[in-house]
Amino acid sequence: MADRVRPAGARRAYLALLRGQARAQASYRISFAVDLVGCLAAVVFDVLSVLVLFRVTRTLGGFGVREAMVMVGLSSFSFATADLTVGNIERIRQYVRTGLLDAVLVRPLGVLPQLLLMDLPLRKVSRSLFGLAVLVVALVRAQVQWTPGRVLLVLVAPLAGVVFFGSIFVASATVAFWWIDSGSSATRSPTAGGTSPRTR
């Protein structure tokens, strides 16, 4: 295996990969704009579902609509950001089958950053931004009595959620070495249909 490059060189290589992905995906502007809007659907439906539930009840599990919207914003932002940054790790099952992973392994760069930057779904940034907007608006309307501890919690909780969901994506994707259809189960919506995975 080739020697590892220095940190500065690795950063330049990763930035080059990221810029290449951005240029490639933004080259078809109309298609990219449509994808940005289309990716909002999942988060919008989550918000609308909660609002519909609270049209028939004032509390749900002891929480009012304002508290519920805070939870929706937190979970939506965390999941969408994790899906944006590491969700495409599910493609590792294709790389293993086609042999592309072997080319990644011999490069003098970290394997996981390469896999994440090879096909970064920048169109999903709209979901993350919308989830953040929902969280901010919900926190403002929730009339929270702010203390230093609660401010710290608001800052840490979304990041912890991103790490939590991201770790699930990465852990489930590693099963690709033994299971053909692994990886996508972590990023697939619980209500989405699909066939059962096939073992080798």
Image: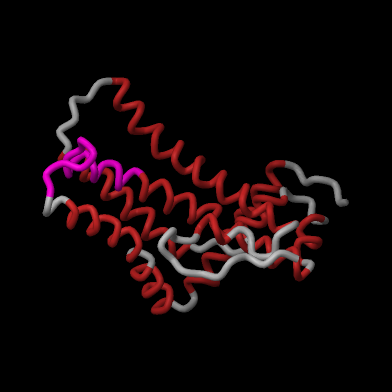
* Magenta span contains residue 151: no
Q: Is residue 145 visible?
A: yes
* Side (left or right) of 1 relative to 42: right
* Magenta span contains residue 58: yes
Q: Return the x and y of residue 122 as percentages of the image width and height.
A: 48, 62
* Side (left or right) of 82 relative to 47: right
> Residue at position x 40%, y 72% from top?
35
Q: What colour scheme does the image use?
A: secondary structure
Asked where in the image residue 18 lies, by quadrant, the reply is: bottom right
Q: Is residue 187 above or below residue 137?
A: below
Q: Is residue 140 visible?
A: no
Q: Is residue 146 above or below residue 5?
A: above
| Residue in the foreground of this view, choosing between 98 and 133 | 98
| Residue in the foreground of this view, choosing between 190 and 89 | 190
Query: Number of callouts in the render?
Result: 0
> Residue at position x 11%, y 44% from top?
58
> Residue at position x 83%, y 56% from top?
106
Q: Return the x and y of residue 43 as percentages of the image width and height.
A: 33, 58
| Residue in the foreground of this view, choosing between 26 and 31 | 31
Magenta stretch? 57-74
Q: Return the x and y of residue 168 as percentages of the image width and height.
A: 56, 46
> Residue at position x 72%, y 48% from top?
110
Asked where in the image residue 195 lies, by quadrant, the reply is: bottom right
Can you say which quadrant of the picture contains the C terminus?
Answer: bottom right
Q: Return the x and y of residue 14 as percentages of the image width and height.
A: 64, 53
* Side (left or right) of 78 relative to 68: right
